[in-house]
Amino acid sequence: MKTNNIFNAKNLVLTLLVATVGISGCKKFLDVNENPNNPDQAAPTLLLPTVQAALGQVIGNTFQVYGNFWAQYWTQSPSASQYKAIDQYNTPNTTTDRPWLTLYRNALVNADLITKNPGANLERTKGIAYIMKAYAFQVATDAFGDVPLSQALSGNQFGSPVYEKQALVYDSIFSYLDKGLALVNTPNAISPGAQDIVFQGDAAKWTQFANTLKLRSYLRLSKIDPAKAQVGVAALYSAQAKFLTQDASIAYSSTGGNENPLYNEMVALNRTQNIVASGTAVRAFKANNDPRAFKFYDVIGSADTIAYIPQGSYTANASKRVSTPSALVGGNANNTASAVAPVKLISAAESYFLQAEAVARGWANSGSVTTLFNEGVTASFLATSLTAAQANAYLASAADARIATAGNVEARIKLIITQKYYAMCGFQGFESWTEWRRTGYPSFFVPSQASTLGANRWPLRFIYPNSEATTNGSYPGTLPIYTPVWWDVN
């Protein structure tokens, strides 16, 4: 599928500023107006790429690793050690300092500054900023649970912003999306053009993105508040909302500093290959004779099979050679093609599967479950450079693709989420793990052999960062990693 806009020189500088701020010291993290880059003096169109690059950094690096491990696409390599704590479900709170800082100080603060700029004819840029604000808050709350919201972006008078309930955060997400949709199509508004590194200011595509994100957000409430979710989805369809038909992604280049964020980190780690194929995902691909597996993972030497180990079994397999994630998903430390792997904010395949679920639940007044399901699978195949013919052959034979004969609503949803899982391999690990928390699908996950949590416990949230525990007077206390977030009622 199409990806958009490799960074130009100006965007590169802004991206490097994002990375620098993300790891720099600060007296209090949420003293957000003390921005070392003085963004309140910058033009909104120049701030926009810092918002998007910051989200790309979070989704494409820390959340990418955690998500792909906890969605059991990847596991720790037997010959390395960088991510053992993730496989052990024993991550210290210092590991989330950097993504938290990047989400709030770089993505959310700069998005907020854009929306408050008094300049004329900036409605489209402000609309995109509101949509990005909604996206960032969803990422934050889905990862951590309750998070700072109303006081988080308001300046130095709030040195200890309170944490607000996830239900309120989700209400704000819907509000920001509504504001963004109202602004993004304003006639005669100046387009940010190339400064928008996702869609280059295309109002129609941003409308589709916002609608798709709203659909994702309402479906996230499907078990905690199904009545609200149903009303929200129905309203989208009554308004004849258009949804994404192409990936919303950030493209990268092989130029120093502009590489895929995960690959960039692997280079900084001396190209040590810490991530390898998990047997959980690979066995599921093989059971369906799924050719996408050979796109998501590399084979060993001249072999025609993917070598894997069970999740977290790096100690028991100390001498085994294991397949790596492919350069397509940015996962091969020693293949420079990993540098140009995109970071997908929302994929076309995800969009179709979200629509299929809405129809399957009876909340949408148009569309066919089978057609949308098939379109999701086909979009995933095309995104890996496979063909529509190969997708059709898979749909005709794979056990996990038999949507037309699924007996009831729950059976259909299980197949939809399971196929979404296959489509997200390597690209959208965090979202896949999040959907597993919401639905319990796919149902073939196994506990990591390295788990320190004990029986029947899984990683269900990120640990709040150490920077919050040590500086925020409103810090609510550390919650165990196995404590479910609000919408996770499985």
Image (tube, rainbow, N blue to C red):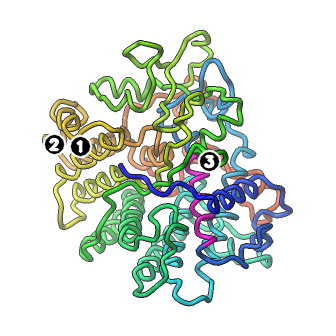
280 above or below 387? above
Q: In this figure, which residue is indicated by the disc labeled 2?
A: 407
Comparing 252 with 249, the one in front is: 252
Q: Quadrant of residue 458?
A: top right
460 above or below 332? below
**SS of the residue under disc 1:** helix
Instruction: Measure how far apart labels 2 and 1 are at the Cα level.
Output: 6 Å
Query: Sequence-wise, which precedes: disc 1 or disc 3?
Result: 1
Q: Please say if the residues under marks 2 and 1 sit with CB atoms less than 8 Å apart.
A: yes
Q: Which mark is residue 315?
A: none
**SS of the residue under disc 3:** loop
Residue drawn at the location 70% of the way across and 53% of the way down: 19
Find out whether residue 149 is within the magenta segment.
Answer: no
Does residue 479 appear to the left or right of 459 in the view shown? right
Instruction: Measure how far apart labels 2 and 3 are at the Cα level.
Output: 36 Å
Magenta: main secondary structure: helix
Q: Which mark is residue 411?
A: 1
Find out whether residue 48 is within the magenta segment.
Answer: yes
Q: Bounds of the magenta span?
A: 46-60
**SS of the residue under disc 2:** loop
Q: In this figure, which residue is indicated by the disc labeled 3?
A: 462
